[in-house]
Amino acid sequence: MGKPDAEGHGPADGVPGLPPEWGRVVVPDDASALAAEAAQIRRELRRTGGGTRLGLPLLVLLVAVLTTLAGLLVVTWPRANRDTDRPAPAPYSPPESLTGRALPALDLVDANDAPVPLRGLLPAMIILLDGCPCPDRVTDALAGAPAGVSVVTVTGGRTGPAGPTTQRQARVLADPAGGLRSFLGQPVRAGTATALLVDRAGIVTRVLPDLGTVESYRSDLSALAG
């Protein structure tokens, strides 16, 4: 195959055209000697090719997930800011402006649908029960009302059952037209009873937006009898 050099290598060490940094290149006389290296190279190529085929779908999936998360962030972030910047609802303010005003001449109805002039029951504590039956509050009002002061309960629709059985009975009326609630100027609040204290001249002396215990209004109730 040629003349060997001084170290016993064949002329392949001097193959022209190969870069010197490749080092010594030995070309065997029998090509079958390269079979093992060829097989190793084919295995490496298959392994590399398989990784590429698997890695591409994973890359596409990763990009899709990141795109979706970015879209959700864009959609929800401004909404969160809007919710944060939204002003809090104004606290409930008692209708104090009604104090000193005259009770309108309203006709409510009793259990028989007969009209009852509300001003004919004065002086009175008028309790609106359209947001809460509140029987305990009605019982307290009846117990605290002095003689000559009526306790009137008003529902929003037709009249309900009679008031609690105690030494006194509340006058149970209904306000189908909603005139009394309209005069009050405040919406119905679930679980809350509202009361008006009205003297014998028909003037509102106090508004109780959230009727509490009798101790919170006993003096005002007693003043109606004067």
Image: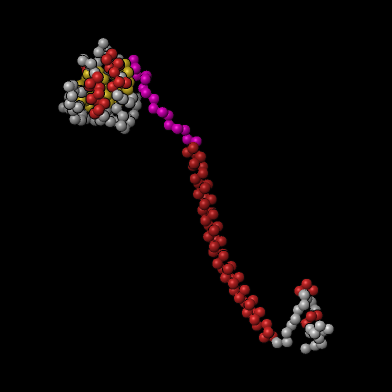
Residue 206, image quadrant: top left
The image quarter containing residue 190 is top left
Q: Is residue 82 left or right of residue 149?
A: right
Task: Please report the residue visible at 63 percent of the width from the left and 77 percent of the height from the top.
Answer: 40
Q: In this view, does 46 lie to the left or right of 203?
A: right
Check the image and name the residue furthest to the right: 6
In the visual, does 184 lie left or right of 81? left
| Membership of 216 in magenta stretch | no
Nearer the observer, 215 or 141: 215
Classified by dominant secondary structure, the portion drawn in magenta counts as loop
Q: Determine whether 144 is above or below 9 in the image.
A: above
Residue 9: x and y in percent read 79, 83
Q: Give the range drawn in magenta.
A: 85-101
Q: Give the image location of residue 147, x and y in percent.
A: 21, 15
Instruction: Tell me the quarter of the picture where residue 164 sits.
Output: top left
Is 192 on the left or on the right of 147, as rendered?
A: right
